[in-house]
Image (cartoon, grey):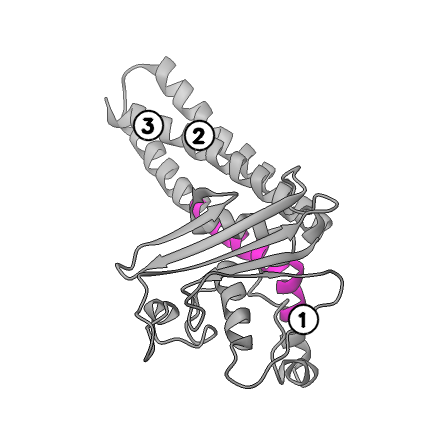
Amino acid sequence: MYLKSLHIQGFKTFEQSTTLELSYPVIAIVGPNGSGKSNLVDALRWTLCEQNLRTLRARSMLDLIFAGSATRHPVNYAEAEVVFNNEGDVFGTGTDTVTVARRIFRSRESDFLIEGNDVQLRDVEELLTSTGLGFRHYPFIGQGEMSRIFTMKPEERKGLFEEVAGIAEYKQRKRDTLVKLEETRVNIARVEDLLAELNGNYAHLGLQAAAAREYVGYQSRLRDLDMDIAHARYLSVRREQERATARLAEAQEKMAEVITSLNSR
């Protein structure tokens, strides 16, 4: 997998449509100060979901749109598009190339696109996750960053490596999942309190109690999933996340059905 081309229009100093065809494996962009080299990197970062204005060297997202010059008028939007060679199907799309684009308008509306189709920011992040491009953009190494890594404390360096490998991302998703499970547990506790107060239909009460007991099974399944994640590490990050999400959704859906059934009484 490698970067095949970069197309920009209306981005910072690049008012006109500009396309760079990159010849793998070695690319060097050279030029005098102020010629736009850093803006090309900014365009690439921005397209790959960078949201930090300081990293993009801008005060607001509108600063990314060409603001005009003494001889040229301002434009109404900025656009950047990157095309990756997908040799080996690193992205898991089954296509020879993968195209990701981003636009922003002066109205502050913005678009993310994959293969020309409108998507959400999260969709692009998930696409990039399996390639290593989705973790705070460590593929971009700026001046002084290598020396900063060498002077890090051991625990800081460990955190950096975990984030690059995707482990930190999974730890955060695990924490989010556990929070949702705790909310589900609280809801189940309320259901159980309500069941204790009911003196009516014991058959229905038995069904509700059985549904509550299923929660324990979901917890066990979550632990199994966590072990799988720790085993597979970043090599199976995307696949395991999808399975975890599906299982959690199933648990939440069933618990929601229990709560809805009781609330409708």
Q: Camera-side residue: 105 or 224?
A: 105
If you read the primary sequence from the N terminus, does the residue marked by circle 1 or circle 3 appear first? 1
From the image, give the main secondary structure of the stretch colored magenta. helix
The label on residue 195 is 3
Give the crowd class for mark 1: few <14, some 14-19, many >=20 residues within 10 Å. Answer: few
Residue drawn 25% across the image and 28% down it: 263
Q: Amino acid at mark 2?
A: Ala
Q: Secondary structure at mark 2?
A: helix
Alpha-carbon span between mark 2 and mark 3:
11 Å
Q: Position of residue 34 (x, y in %)?
A: 50, 83
Q: Is residue 172 inside the magenta stretch?
A: yes
Q: Are marks 2 and 1 in contact (CB under 8 Å)?
A: no
Q: Hey, which residue is sitting farthest left in the picture?
A: 265
Disc 2 target residue: 212
Check if mark 2's residue and mark 3's residue have beta carbons within 8 Å: yes
Q: Nearer the viewer, mark 2 or mark 1?
A: 1
Label 3 crowd bin: few (<14), some (14–19), many (20+), radius 10 Å: some
Q: Which residue is mark 1?
A: 158
Mark 2 vs mark 1: which is more N-terminal?
1
Residue depicted at 45% across the width and 69% down the height? 14
Q: Quadrant of the C terminus?
A: top left
Q: Please name the amino acid that badge 3 sits on.
A: Leu
Image depth: mark 1 or mark 3 in front: 1
Query: What element does badge 3 sit on?
Result: helix
- Compared with 237, 55 (above or below) is below
Query: Disc 1 on helix, strand or loop?
Result: helix
Is residue 264 visible in the rendered image? The answer is yes
The residue depicted at 53 percent of the width and 58 percent of the height is: 7
Q: Residue shown at 64%/78% (left/top)?
A: 30
Label 1 is placed on what type of residue? Lys
> Magenta span covers which residues?
160-180
First in residue order: circle 2 vs circle 3: 3
